Image (cartoon, rainbow, N blue to C red):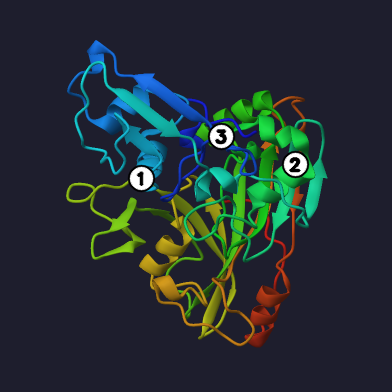
């Protein structure tokens, strides 16, 4: 059964909106019913806030969903609302029904391209189209489900060992922890920027400016379109500092192949920084990049991953070439893929 994330892990992943990481009740078993008397210390509290203290193993948002399902009763009355006040001595009944989120963390037998494996960690080559972990609209068929299906030990590690993410339509290398100790150590490495992540990005337009450039531009939600991220002015909008080092590998009048090195891990960071330079990624419709024949997802590939093994101290470095769809797009413009030296 998947453990809820421990305190201090949230900084390892640049998360978008997602459901709570709850322990999943057995969907085939009769639902557990909890009956709890409201103590004097919670008199006149909101029902959802009181329940979050009375049932501490579940989040407030999870309990609100149970209310919406009619699974919470107050003094045997159904149809209760989260903001409803409770009174000392009242009886609250909670039927622990599984939600879509709680049922999401189930093992599935899905193929995984494992580049490296030892007792502490895995390095996987994620294909484009694979969602990393369950979220709204993708409650199954994710990398997390595949990890749970591959190794029973993954259920004992928060998020099945996932410490960083790739967008659904970005391909390439990811490291995954296989133990809690390895996960905590990887989180520290990522926070200290000691995990080197390098990407190949195919952008529209003739490259302008120097072949190498550093982009230091904060990223936050686009104030004009909440579905997108954008470079923002931190004096006016919320956001976080972001740095990407870019180096032109090859290009012509229509497109440019760029080597990108991440120094921070913001949501859609490379996509936003490339678009800010007027080189939106090919086929990245969200940020203005038109598709080409055979490539229907953003032209971004996590090509190189390097770090010191958190448990053994061994220096590890992994490479994976662009997949067929990106390789075909490069061929359309006659752009050469020559393995770039990781100088960025």
Q: Mark 2 and mark 1 in contact (Cβ < 8 Å)? A: no
Residue that extends furthest to the top in the rendered view of this protein: 40
Q: Position of residue 285 (x, y in %)?
A: 45, 76
- Determine the image quadrant of residue 44: top left
Q: CA distance from mark 3 to mark 2?
A: 24 Å
Reply above or below: 136 against 9: below
Q: Nearer the viewer, mark 1 or mark 2?
A: 2
Please name the residue that numbered disc 1 is placed on: 241
User: In the displayed structure, would residue 304 be above or below residue 326?
Assistant: above
Q: Earlier in the sequence, mark 1 or mark 2?
A: 2
Q: Quadrant of residue 126?
A: bottom right
Task: Locate residue 192 relative to residue 41 in the image: left or right.
Answer: right
Give residue 154's position: percent from left, percent from top: 71, 36
Q: Is residue 127 above or below residue 344?
A: below
Query: Where residue 23 is drawn, which disc sits there?
Result: 3
| Disc 3 to disc 2: CB gap under 8 Å | no
Helix, strand or loop at label 2? It is strand
Q: Residue at x 73, y 74 (%)?
A: 324
- Coordinates of residue 157 in the picture (x, y in percent): 65, 31
> Residue 238: where, in percent of width, then height?
25, 47
Q: Which residue is mark 2?
A: 122
> How far, Cα to Cα, is label 3 from label 1?
34 Å
């Amino acid at each position: 059964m998947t453990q809820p994330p421990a305190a201090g892990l949230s900084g390892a992943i640049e998360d978008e909106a997602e459901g709570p990481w709850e322990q999943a009740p057995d969907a085939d078993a009769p639902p557990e019913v909890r009956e709890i008397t409201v103590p004097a210390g919670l008199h006149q509290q909101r029902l959802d806030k009181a329940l979050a203290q009375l049932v501490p193993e579940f989040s407030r948002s999870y309990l609100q969903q149970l209310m919406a399902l009619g699974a919470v009763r107050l003094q045997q009355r159904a149809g209760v609302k989260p903001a409803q006040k409770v009174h000392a001595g009242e009886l609250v009944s909670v039927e622990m029904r599984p939600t879509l989120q709680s049922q999401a963390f189930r093992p599935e037998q899905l193929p995984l391209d494992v580049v490296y494996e030892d007792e502490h960690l895995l390095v996987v080559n994620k294909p484009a189209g694979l969602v990393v972990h369950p979220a709204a609209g993708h409650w199954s068929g994710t990398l997390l489900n595949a990890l749970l299906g591959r190794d029973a030990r993954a259920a004992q590690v928060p998020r099945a060992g996932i410490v960083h993410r790739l967008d659904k339509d970005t391909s390439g290398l990811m490291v995954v922890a296989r133990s809690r100790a390895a996960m905590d150590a990887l989180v520290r490495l990522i926070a200290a920027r000691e995990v080197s992540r390098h990407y190949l990005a195919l952008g529209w337009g003739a490259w302008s400016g120097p072949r190498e450039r550093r982009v230091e531009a904060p990223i936050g939600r686009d104030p004009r379109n909440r579905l997108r991220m954008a470079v923002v002015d931190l004096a006016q909008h919320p956001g976080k500092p972001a740095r990407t080092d870019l180096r032109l590998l090859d290009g012509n009048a229509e497109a440019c192949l760029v080597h990108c090195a991440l120094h921070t891990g913001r949501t859609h960071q490379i996509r936003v920084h490339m678009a800010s330079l007027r080189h939106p990624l090919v086929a990245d419709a969200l940020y203005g990049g038109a598709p080409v024949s055979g490539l229907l997802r953003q032209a971004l590939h996590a090509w190189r991953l390097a770090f010191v093994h958190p448990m053994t101290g061994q220096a590890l470095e992994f490479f994976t070439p662009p997949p067929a769809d990106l390789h075909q797009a490069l061929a359309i413009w006659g752009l050469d893929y020559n393995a770039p030296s990781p100088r960025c």
